[in-house]
């Protein structure tokens, strides 16, 4: 309704005969989690910044590992810029990430280095997924990253077929992110009797996604392996 | 003008000293293009004298002949001892006294000529060409041309020794990187041009810098694929020399390139995107300049149960995505065929996503309050909380047969801060290894 009003107003000023086109729908890269892919219309948008955030143990790293596993299984080359040197290759390989197709950049607990590395990787081109992992970076440091830097990253990735992902505790990129996925832990699943045969089974995660026009909140389970 | 050297010994290097166009006519004869040498040495006799002087310096005793065409020079050098310069147009007269056997005709032709009483060059040269063509055919005509010293042909040149290197000595010691790069750019331009003329490329450049007052600084730049992109090489040199600058002013610059066949691979239409190898190398060099050399690369798992063990390695030779097109296509077609033959089963409930673990590097030392044998509360840098639930302990150990054994008891704990951690106790104390995320 609002769009129709806007259109009428434009046409009253500029005259009729304009071709109104729907915005270009970006290509999507599946995340490997059926619930999220279904909710997001196929996965994460290419050529755009997606921000995944949430508290510790909320399934952010598992979601990222699933995205990387999917991308590497499609023979794409991925890059992980690890600001806090927290990546665990063993669990990533168990999640299906083909490590030989993943470039790992370990920054020395320096978010600024990580941003520079991401910028260079995007400028270099050819990566299917570039992930910036700020999940363990203190929120006050992550917040210091200027909006200009995020805007620069967004502009750099705009015309590339790359999925740019930022993982953090709180949202930082604000309007520069085309898609935000908030992860929240619903419950922790244990089995067995406490102190005798207790086992950590998994975590039930609720992912709330906000896009410009729609919002959804699929849930998925992370299984401890 | 062509020169022919006939004699014993290694004649080819002597010929290459005077000309790049050298033909190894036989084991004891080399012929080379001597045109233009007059400008260096003077008249043809001076050129001949210079060649003989150099041969004497090399300890060679040779016959030398200079003529307007290579075959006349070869016949003269083989037939006459010493040095001879055959004036243009006088070849037939000059070579006339030589025996026809020197031209090595076929036995049948030689017998015919013997029967006719023709033994020397001048005898054959005097015969009419039409009659020779009728009686002896093309071979006879060719023999007559050689006997008259009129045969014209091109040399079959030897490939010169392939050396793609250049050096330069600046007038004063170079202290700054920018002027040094200016010199390297000049050397690089020459080397890449020479490589390009041979349809070659390079994947390894060696920079050798002589320092003042002594010592050398050597750097080797490698590319995953051969390339001739001098801009990319120059940028790589810049990044490498910025990261590893020479310790003293540079007095001599040398650049060596290892020749390699250029890569000629066309990727398929459906091959996933991959970084361009040369561009990737530049990007990696830039990132290494920011985060450090050992902190960028591809990781490989190690066959051990030791927690956190992995092996870092550089990006694979040939970069990524090179030569994978066919395999990928086959994989895709195989998947399509399987999808047709074996329809997808009715989907059940979605499989849970495997969890990931986030490591603390190094593990955070923790103060753990115990209740009987179980952790009750944990305090570590950035982590503090009461244990809500836990699983464990899981005892693991390994490498007891080596000098670096390990053993520990692990717990999975849910703390009151809401997070799930892996806690372990080893002989050194308590540590938080990381969190489930």
Image: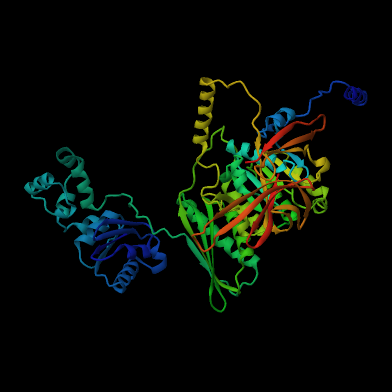
Give the quarter of the image for residue B132.
top left
Give the quarter of the image for residue B286.
bottom right
Q: Give the left or right position of residue A192, taking residue B331 as reference.
A: right
Residue B226, horizontal then vertical, whole percent = 50, 50
Given residues B86 and A169, the one toward you in this image is A169
Residue A215, horizontal then vertical, whole percent = 81, 30
Colouring of the image:
rainbow
> Is residue B236 positioned above or below B418 on the image?
below
Residue B89 visible in this rendered orientation of the protein: no
Residue A213, horizontal then vertical, whole percent = 82, 29
Residue at the limit of the structure toward the left, as seen here = B115
Residue B231 visible in this rendered orientation of the protein: yes
Location of the C terminus of chain B by quadrant is: top right
> Is residue B66 positioned above or below B137 on the image?
below
Residue B421, horizontal then vertical, whole percent = 71, 49
Q: Residue at x 34, y 70 (%)?
A: B50
């Amino acid at each position: 309704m609002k769009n129709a009003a806007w259109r009428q107003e434009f046409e009253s000023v500029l005259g009729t005969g304009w071709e109104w086109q729907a915005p270009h729908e970006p290509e999507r890269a599946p995340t490997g989690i059926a619930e999220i892919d279904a909710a997001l219309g196929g996965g994460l948008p290419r050529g755009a910044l997606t921000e995944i955030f949430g508290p510790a143990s909320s399934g952010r790293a598992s979601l990222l590992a699933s995205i990387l596993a999917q991308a590497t299984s499609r023979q794409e080359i991925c890059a992980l810029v690890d600001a806090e040197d927290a990546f665990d290759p063993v669990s990533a390989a168990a999640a299906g990430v083909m490590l030989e197709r993943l470039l790992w950049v370990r920054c020395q607990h320096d978010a600024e280095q990580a941003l520079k590395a991401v910028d260079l990787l995007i400028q270099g081109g050819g990566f299917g997924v570039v992930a910036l992992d700020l999940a363990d970076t203190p929120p006050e440091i992550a917040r210091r990253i200027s909006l200009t830097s995020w805007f620069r990253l967004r502009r750099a990735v705009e015309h590339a077929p790359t999925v740019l992902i930022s993982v953090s505790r709180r949202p930082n990129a604000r309007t520069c992110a085309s898609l935000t996925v908030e992860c929240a832990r619903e419950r922790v699943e244990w089995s067995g009797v406490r102190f005798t045969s207790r086992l950590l089974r998994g975590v039930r995660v609720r992912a709330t996604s906000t896009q410009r026009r729609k919002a959804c909140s699929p849930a998925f389970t992370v299984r401890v392996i | 003008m062509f020169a022919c050297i006939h004699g014993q010994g290694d004649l080819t290097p002597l010929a290459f000293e005077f000309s790049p166009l050298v033909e190894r006519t036989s084991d004891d004869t080399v012929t080379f293009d001597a045109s233009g040498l007059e400008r260096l040495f003077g008249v043809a006799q001076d050129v001949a004298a210079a060649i003989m002087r150099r041969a004497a310096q090399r300890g060679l005793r040779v016959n030398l002949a200079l003529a307007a065409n290579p075959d006349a020079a070869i016949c003269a050098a083989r037939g006459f001892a010493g040095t001879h310069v055959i004036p243009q147009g006088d070849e037939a007269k000059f070579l006339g006294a030589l025996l026809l056997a020197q031209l090595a005709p076929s036995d049948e032709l030689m017998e015919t000529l013997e029967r006719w009483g023709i033994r020397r060059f001048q005898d054959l040269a005097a015969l009419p060409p039409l009659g020779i063509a009728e009686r002896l055919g093309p071979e006879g005509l060719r023999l007559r041309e050689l006997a008259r010293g009129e045969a014209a042909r091109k040399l079959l040149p030897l490939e010169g020794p392939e050396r793609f290197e250049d050096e330069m000595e600046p007038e004063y010691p170079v202290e700054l990187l920018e002027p040094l790069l200016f010199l390297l750019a000049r050397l690089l331009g020459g080397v890449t041009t020479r490589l390009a003329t041979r349809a070659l490329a390079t994947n390894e450049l060696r920079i050798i810098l002589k320092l003042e007052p002594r010592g050398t600084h050597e750097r080797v730049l490698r590319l995953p694929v051969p390339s001739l992109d001098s801009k990319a090489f120059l940028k790589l040199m810049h990044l490498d020399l910025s990261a590893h600058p020479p310790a003293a002013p540079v007095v001599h610059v040398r650049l060596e390139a290892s020749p390699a066949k250029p890569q000629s691979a066309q990727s398929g239409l459906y091959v996933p995107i991959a970084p361009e190898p040369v561009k990737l190398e530049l990007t990696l060099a830039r990132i290494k300049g920011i985060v450090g050399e050992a902190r960028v690369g591809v990781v490989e798992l190690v066959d051990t149960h030791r927690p956190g063990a992995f092996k870092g390695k550089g990006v694979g030779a040939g970069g990524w995505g090179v030569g994978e097109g066919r395999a990928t296509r086959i994989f895709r077609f195989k998947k399509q065929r399987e999808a047709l033959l074996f329809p997808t089963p009715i989907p059940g409930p979605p499989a849970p996503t495997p969890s990931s673990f986030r490591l603390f590097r190094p593990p955070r030392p923790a103060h753990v309050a115990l209740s009987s044998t179980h952790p009750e509360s944990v305090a570590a840098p950035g982590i503090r909380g009461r244990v809500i639930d836990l699983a464990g302990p899981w005892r693991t150990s390994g490498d007891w047969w080596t000098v670096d054994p390990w053993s520990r008891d692990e717990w999975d704990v849910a703390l009151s801060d809401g997070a799930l951690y892996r806690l372990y106790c080893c002989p050194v104390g308590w540590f938080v290894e990381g969190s489930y995320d």
